[in-house]
Image: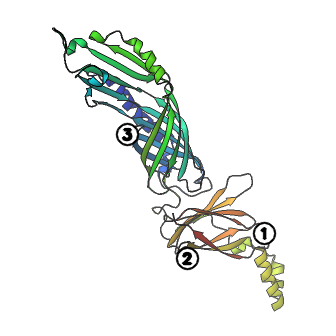
């Protein structure tokens, strides 16, 4: 006997999946999906600045849909709906292995493993390619149903028992709780650096002790007592493995997105002019041009008192020692006890860049190229005797 599909539950599951995705798109700020202006408040490490949609498939779901966003630079939040619901008929079973003669068992099965996932991801390394995943899976119409019946009639001496008279035995597997803790490890970026990424994930979730429910018809009625010994035999079968592959599509744009920045484009907080940087009283200016020696001394004083310096950077390929063809540069000002502030970002060709920086502060440079690993380097300009011009070389390791 075929098991009737619970169409109401299936329809409800699909509706829930649409509501989840729609709510995520409403909750997350829609302006992050557009090109954003670069400011101190628009830091890549700030919460909800990066958003991606993912589609996955694996042992946990035939199709999974999710939305991911960042809570910080190395922590992501992912909400998803995972759909695995279909009927299937395994190959017929030879009943002789159970001592029932040369008879055939027909089996019909229904699999319903639809879940909602609320997961957090921690990336311990700056590349964000390795993810430690943990969270909670919520089961919807979650279970497995199996129905078995004989294909052939039974002959006992002169007495014939029709297969229909023997009847059908039904077994349902489920768990007492619908909340399943999940632990896993992922490889690849959950939120792409560019547009698309492919990532793998393996893990396991705790479904709890299995429960079984028996029912039947015809001569196979009154078999509920079979559930208890089966539950005892499978009581340790509580952890279920998961392996999946996922394709992610980034919705929010990065400050270094090629579609936002043209060649050598740069967004920054413009530093004050030289007249604003160094203010010399008029009397001292007049005196400084009295003699050549006095003029030379005054120029050295202007250099020492300048509030800004020019940093010249050159970026090399570690593998061959050559300059890279382009580089994305994000510059952050580091302040004790405060979040770092993004003050400048841009794309520079030929791997060279010139950036004016205010003295007396520490800065973090984040250099990105699609063929190389991200490099983060700190530059300390708190030394009062730092020169007016600073030349630095950076080396990138291939991915």
Residue 38 in sight from this viewpoint:
yes
> Crowding near pointer 2: few (<14 within 10 Å), some, many (20+)?
few
Q: Which residue is mark 1?
A: 383
The residue drawn where x is 50% and y is 44% is: 68
Disc 3, SS: strand
**Foreground tag (1 vs 2):** 2
Viewer-proximal residue among 391 and 186: 186
Could you say which disc has been placed on residue 63 in the image?
3
Coordinates of residue 38 in the picture (x, y in percent)? 57, 58
Q: Based on the displayed image, in which of its 4 quarters is residue 71 positioned?
A: top right
Q: Which residue is mark 2?
A: 321
N-term mark: 3 or 1: 3
Viewer-proximal residue among 242 and 265: 242
Q: Are marks 1 and 2 in contact (CB under 8 Å)?
A: no
Disc 2, SS: loop
Q: Residue furthest left?
A: 158
Coordinates of residue 315 in the picture (x, y in percent)? 57, 72
């Amino acid at each position: 006997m075929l098991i009737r599909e619970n169409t109401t539950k299936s329809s409800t599951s699909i509706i829930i999946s649409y509501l989840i995705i729609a709510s995520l798109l409403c909750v997350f700020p829609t302006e992050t999906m557009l090109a954003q202006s670069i400011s101190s408040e628009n830091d890549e490490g700030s919460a909800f600045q990066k958003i991606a949609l993912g589609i996955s498939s694996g042992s946990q779901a035939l199709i999974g849909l999710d939305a991911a966003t960042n809570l910080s630079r190395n922590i992501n939040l992912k909400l998803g709906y995972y759909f695995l619901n279909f009927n299937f008929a395994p190959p017929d079973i030879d009943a002789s292995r159970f001592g029932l003669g040369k008879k055939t068992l027909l089996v019909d099965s229904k699999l319903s493993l639809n879940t909602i996932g609320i997961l957090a991801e921690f990336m311990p390394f700056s590349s964000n390619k390795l993810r430690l995943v943990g969270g909670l899976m919520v089961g919807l119409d979650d279970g497995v149903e199996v129905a078995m019946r004989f294909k052939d009639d039974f002959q006992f001496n002169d007495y014939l028992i029709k297969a229909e008279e023997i009847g059908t035995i039904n077994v349902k597997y489920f768990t007492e709780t619908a909340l399943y803790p999940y632990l896993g490890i992922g490889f690849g970026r959950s939120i792409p650096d560019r547009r698309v990424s492919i990532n793998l994930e393996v893990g396991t979730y705790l479904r709890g002790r299995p429960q079984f429910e028996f029912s039947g018809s015809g001569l196979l009625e009154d078999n509920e007592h079979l559930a208890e010994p089966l539950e005892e035999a499978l009581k340790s079968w509580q952890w279920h493995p998961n392996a999946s592959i996922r394709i992610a599509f980034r919705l929010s744009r990065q400050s270094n997105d090629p579609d936002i920045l043209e060649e050598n484009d740069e967004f920054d907080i413009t530093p004050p002019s030289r007249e604003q940087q160094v203010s010399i009283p008029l009397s001292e200016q007049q005196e400084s041009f009295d003699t050549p020696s006095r003029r030379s001394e005054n120029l050295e004083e202007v250099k020492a008192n300048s509030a800004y310096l020019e940093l010249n950077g050159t970026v090399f390929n570690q593998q061959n020692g050559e300059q890279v063809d382009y580089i994305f540069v994000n510059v952050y000002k580091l302040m004790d006890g405060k979040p770092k502030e993004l003050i400048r970002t841009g794309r520079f060709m030929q791997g060279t860049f010139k950036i004016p920086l205010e003295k007396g502060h520490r800065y973090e440079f984040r250099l990105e190229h699609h063929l190389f690993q991200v490099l983060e380097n700190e530059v300390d300009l708190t030394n009062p005797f730092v020169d007016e011009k600073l030349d630095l070389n950076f080396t990138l390791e291939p991915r």
